[in-house]
Image (spheres, helix red, strand yellow):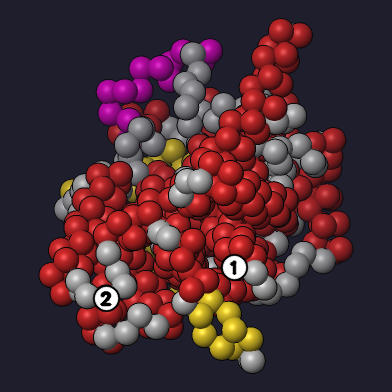
Amino acid sequence: MTYEGWILLTACLVGISCGTVGCFLIIRRMTMLADAISHSVLLGIVLTFLIANSLDGMYMLIGAAVIGFVTTFAIQSLHQAGVQEDASIGIVFTTFFAIGVILLSLFAKDVHLDVEHALMGEIAFLPLNTHTLFGFEIPKATSMLLAITAFTLVVILLFYKELKITSFDAALALTLGLPVTLIHYLLMGLVSITAVGSFDAVGAILVVSMLVVPGVCAYLLTDRLSLMLLYSCIFGIASAVFGYYGAAWLDVSISGAMSTAGGILFLFTWIFSPRYGLLQRLTSAVST
Amino acid sequence: MHALEVKDLQVAYDKKAVLEHVNLTIPKGSLTAIVGPNGAGKSTLMKAILGMLKRSSGHISVLGKPYSPKNRNVGYVPQRGSVDWDFPTNSLDVILMGRYAHIGWFKRPSKQDVTLAKEALQKLGMEAYANRQIRQLSGGQQQRVFLARALVQDADVYLMDEPFVGVDAKTENAIIDLLRELQQKGKTVIVVHHDLQTVPEYFDHTLLLNRTVIANGPTELVFTKDLLQKTYGGALAFFTAPDDRISG
């Protein structure tokens, strides 16, 4: 595959994995948690590097999953101790992220990790770092994202019912004997590994836009959760493709262009959605 | 055997007791109203019974066995405001959620589950709204969807938190018909109820609650002016004006 092809494929995988996981954050009204986890993941990566002394993907995934769990748990504990939920999110992730930044500048100066990279990602250079898998030479980030996307889709397919009912009515789920807390942490685990997988490509800040924007667009177009997931994937891919070619055309950051493309797609959907679009609402207001 | 037995239940928020020394039994096959002023702990009692709130102490039995969600013998209808009605789903889909425990892990609803859900919709006069997004339903229709969902759970004991609040007359009639039908099938229905005027008409058993059980028994014995006065304290003035119904 061409250099360009690898970048596009990687970007599309970010779009798919973030797009599907993000839908569940949106319907649970927890998009701020995406922000929290995507930033805390930096601490997870740095700590994993310091402990394992490796930037290998598997270690990173474990580190990210652990820190995602710790972040969610810390936010919940603070909230239960009487701090407002949005404030607990604000306290926890900024602190974790700041510790990550300090550790990074203290101990990990010489490695392929720096703050700018952590914030913005650098998808343009990802195809340079390859390994051989089943006889194919494939960029490391791409193979990791392939695995993460496949895992995410399988988990969502297997636990679709449970993810849906705990999102809509946790009280009912509890009386039906479902492990509500476990499913919550399962979702947070998915968010964490998706965030760490996309981290290299688009960075901690823009991964939030990839997690939130495609799902919000899809939400405006359908009343079915299954279709929302599908549309969200399509919006994620569209943001990736438009973003890539937009960046090539204007010679700007690819991850920045991807998020901007997502923003523009959202604006169009918000205005023109036949169900909940602005125009639809205006015309129905006039006609009644 | 009692449908529900609660022994020495205590619940506290921030060390402040909300429910104290709650002991009660609800007879099997009864239609029971839980009545008490705002802040009496009615919803808290239901949530504590179902294990959604941490109990400081207490033991709950359902039909002679310690309560566990795994037994699937208790159906819960939460307050309408407790869920997000903007959720991307429709009426039929919400009702199918009541079947999820029966369906089991990794499986999709079967034709039989869908048939049951459609029958429940029909029973509540909602068949025309099966594919309607739930935000687009009226308050009464939303409540009927919740009840249809409880119906397909096929439980033995139902706990319902204020199903009559904010609903139209048509829905109120549909709900009470359904509760009576459940009772005829030998089910036990326990309802947090706000409207004192309709208690004697709708319910054969009544529990008066104000942080602890004030009285518990057949409605004609419990629903007396003295005991209500004891439950509501000075706040019972409205009861003398039959037309002045309180709402949620």
Asked if residue B135 shows in the view, the reply is yes
Figure check: A125 above or below B211:
below
Q: Residue at x 26, y 48 (%)?
A: A90
Horizontal and vertical percent position of residue A63: 34, 76
Labels 2, 1: front one: 1
SS assignment at label 2: loop
Q: Nearer the viewer, residue B104 or A144?
A: A144
Looking at numbered disc 1 in the image, what kind of residue is underneath it? Tyr
> What residue sits right under mark 2 in the picture?
A111
Question: Which of disc 1 and disc 2 is earlier in sequence?
Answer: 1
Looking at numbered disc 2 in the image, what kind of residue is underneath it? Val
Q: Residue at x 35, y 80 (%)?
A: A55
Q: Residue at x 76, y 48 (%)?
A: B92
Range of magenta residues: B231-243
Chain hosting mark 2:
A
User: Quick check: is B234 in the magenta stretch?
Assistant: yes
User: Quick check: is B226 in the magenta stretch?
Assistant: no
Tell me the tag on residue A3. Answer: 1
Chain hosting mark 1:
A
* Image quadrant in which the C terminus of chain A is located: top right
